[in-house]
Amino acid sequence: MLVVDDTEAKRYLIAQTLRLAGMEVVEAATGQEALAAMVALPEVVVLDARLPDMSGFDVCRQLKQDPATAAIPVLYISALLRDEELERRLFEDGADGYIPQPIEPKHLVAQTWALVRMRRAERARQREREQAQVEHQRLQHELAKSQARAQRLSESGVVGTLYWDLDGSVLDANDTFLAMVGYTREELAQGRLDWRKMTPPEWEEPDRQNVEVVKRHGVGPMWEKQYVRKDGSRVDILLGSALLEGESRRGVSLVVDITARREAERKLTQLMAELESKERLLQAVLHQMPTGVLIVEAPSGRMLLSNERLVSILGASAVPMGGVESYRWELTRYPHGQRYQLAELPMVRALGGEVVLGEELVVHRDDGRQVLSRVNAAPVRDAEGRIVASVLTLEDITEQKATQESLRLSEERLRLALDSAALGVWRHDPTTGAMEWDARTKELFGLSPNARTGLDRWLEIVHPEDHERVRELSRRAFSGENGGLYDTEYRVTGPRDRGVMRWLASRGRAHVDADGRRWLMGTVRDITERKLSEQRAADLQATTAIFAQALTPRQVADAVMAHGLRALDAYAGAVSIVEGQELLVLSSVGYPESIVQPYRGIPLSLRTPPTDAARTGRMVWVESHEAFERGWPDVARRLHDSRSRAWGSIPLVSGDRVVGVLGLSFSTPRRLSEREKAHLESLCRLCAQALERARLFEETRRRSELEQQFLGMVSHDLRNPLQAISLGARTLQRLEKPTPEALLRMAGRIANSADTMGRMISDLLDFTRGRLGGGIPLERTESDLMRLCREVIDEFTVTHPSSDIRLEGDGSCEGWWDGTRMRQVLSNLLSNALRHARAGTPVVVRASGKGGEASLAVSNEGEPVPAELLPVLFEPFRRGMSKFRPSGSLGLGLYIVRQVVEGHGGKVEVETGAAGTTFLVRVPCGTEPVSVT
């Protein structure tokens, strides 16, 4: 219910009155609101004639003009118009009533409910009309379908229809019936068709009886008869008749032409006769067949048919004459010897619906013979799919199997021979270009087993540089040159090898078949290993010769650079050596200095492909820039503008130690075959050995130079005290009466020179023992380190009265040491400290013992030891060749110190700086030596 009024109080009064009457009310104050509220389709509209935006009459006209709202009743309310004017408006606008003001509530409710009931009744009538229309359409559709089916049946050309009278006249018929009896529709219209006359004499009585049945029951059964056609021929029909509704003499008949069926029956009879004849022929053929045949009935298993061959294979006593149960199945066994059970027999399985094809079994005959047979069995089904029988064929394959086994063994031997030689077999017809390859040949060509073959495919695989040569050799063999022999070696790059080149050897001969056609047949085998071995052997021999001439690590690096780049088509590379915890570039080719400079020396702890190879001792191969970014993103960013697309880092291993790394760069993505990896590893092993030899050569050369210098130095240093002794002795010889003072002075000089020579000779002996005798010999006794220090310092105080030598430490420090050698250690360190101490500064000796270990430290204040001497400070000759070597020293003092300390199981270290230098010795206190008797 919609109430439209611009006066709120009046609208409220109307709406509240209608709500109290049980109606749902929607309110609107203007005409536009009223039109918008029509979306809900109210049952009645109570409309004020005057509204602020448009008149109620205009609203009513718009509602009545819209088909969606035209049926909604409109009730005018107005206090300004007379009744006659409202009636005119009702007629003109199509409104359904009016209520004058003042409004009488009862009048309002009554008129409104009347309009609501009218609206609801109109809706119900509309729904009924719609339902009736739908039902009418459905019935019309069903009728049309029924008429269409009848029309299709009548016009299908399968069923003839005729309308008849009992007097024999044919009132109407469809074209199928007319074609069936050979009459036209004009003749039908002329009344020339009479169903009684078309009935042959021998069918008159059956026809009369059928008419009586139709007259009695209104419908007759379907029965077979004949009609005589217009041309005198007869047509076999199946006829069904019925009286028309409300008729006693007129009816309709459906006629089906069964001439084809009758003809089929006649042919069936003929076929049955022929079948009997063929069955007799089948019996004769079955008995002549080389295969045994058995047909048994289902489900009984009764034998229906067998032939003589079956009896000859199984033996007469084994044929199941009475049924499956009578078969002696214990005579039948599997090829491996196990007996069949009854349910496992192929014939029984076929009765169950299984198809058995090519199953082999062994029949043990009563006469002792064993027959190997091949069995096929299958069920026989009728038209409905039911199993009515099973058929079994049995073939004696004893001799065939023996022949096949012999052939199989021969083929197996041939296959084993081909496999052991890794040979593939091929056949080629040069006339047509056809090629046949076995699986091994396809594999050697890098193809899958299902790949196509042919001359064009072969030319895709063979290296382009070998095409013409190989085809020329094929033409010569085909033409008969050299006895038709074809023998060549060529290169291939198969699709699955991704560009990796391999070598194949192919050998064959031309043949001529019975029709005079020529073709080539031969074998092919992979000789890549042999070719590569020859090439690698030549390369390695050349490389070995180059390495043999390389005397320095730099020369070795240059040689491997030249060979490695050439062998693997790398555009750039570098050789680095391991020095301590760093990897140093020794030689590089193809890299700009901006790339090489940051890697002149990189810590092994830094993650790069070369350092990873150096740490792990394994080859690092990076096949693409994407792989580089995944594994080493920090390094890859620096190589973003590089032309490299693949990288290799191969460790140079000597024994179990990595001495360096060979790095290679490629301008295209690159992967190595296993053979290339093995060759490259061999090259790197040779390089590592050559680097070690070069290092040893340089070390030996340096040592030789040092030893020559040392010999010169020893000769020079020994000459001075020797000359002093010689000069002193000659002086004494020339003095006739030397004074005691002169004798004492000369004797002192000779003694000092002899002591100097003794010390030098002692150092040489200790050096020789350390180098050649397995170390300096020690004789351990119980000693006190503090006492030894005091004694040595006392001696140095006498010989160096101007020096300030101080002793610090515990009261005692006892242990098992060689006292003489420990004196020598302290003497050498103290002598070294006094020589290099700054004038006027003290030399401090500290001795202490703690936790089973004694420590001895000798410190002075002086210039620090040069940094370049620290790594070789304790090696022989190094100190002696420096500018710090004093007169009378061979440079073996510190070497002997280390040998003695290490002989006691200890170690010696040096700390140097602007404040001075300290040599620190730590040795275990040891235990009393155990004497073995």
Image (tube, grey):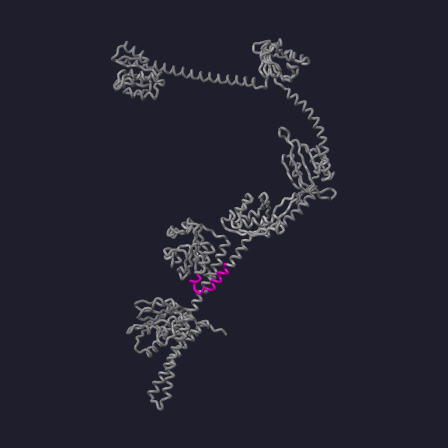
Residue 341 magenta-highlighted: no
Nearest the eye: 745 or 490:
490
Q: Residue at x 66, y 31 (%)?
A: 388
Residue 91 position in % (x across, y down):
31, 11
Residue 708 position in % (x across, y down):
41, 73
Nearest the eye: 910 or 192:
192
Quadrant of the rendered image containing residue 815: bottom left
Q: Residue at x 70, y 44 (%)?
A: 399
Query: Does residue 110 appear in this view?
Result: no
Quadrant of the rendered image containing residue 281: top right
Query: Does residue 239 appear in this view?
Result: yes
Nearest the eye: 311 or 557:
557
Residue 797 position in % (x across, y down):
32, 78
Quadrant of the snapshot with the N terminus? top left
Q: Check the image and name the residue furthest to the bottom.
A: 737
Count of labels in the image: 0
Quadrant of the rendered image containing residue 289: top right
Whether 683 is drawn above or below 339: the answer is: below
Q: Residue at x 62, y 45 (%)?
A: 518
Whether 114 is drawn above or below 923: the answer is: above
Residue 810 position in % (x across, y down):
34, 71
Dominant secondary-structure state across the stretch colored magenta: helix
Q: Which residues are magenta?
A: 539-557
Nearest the eye: 685 or 243:
685
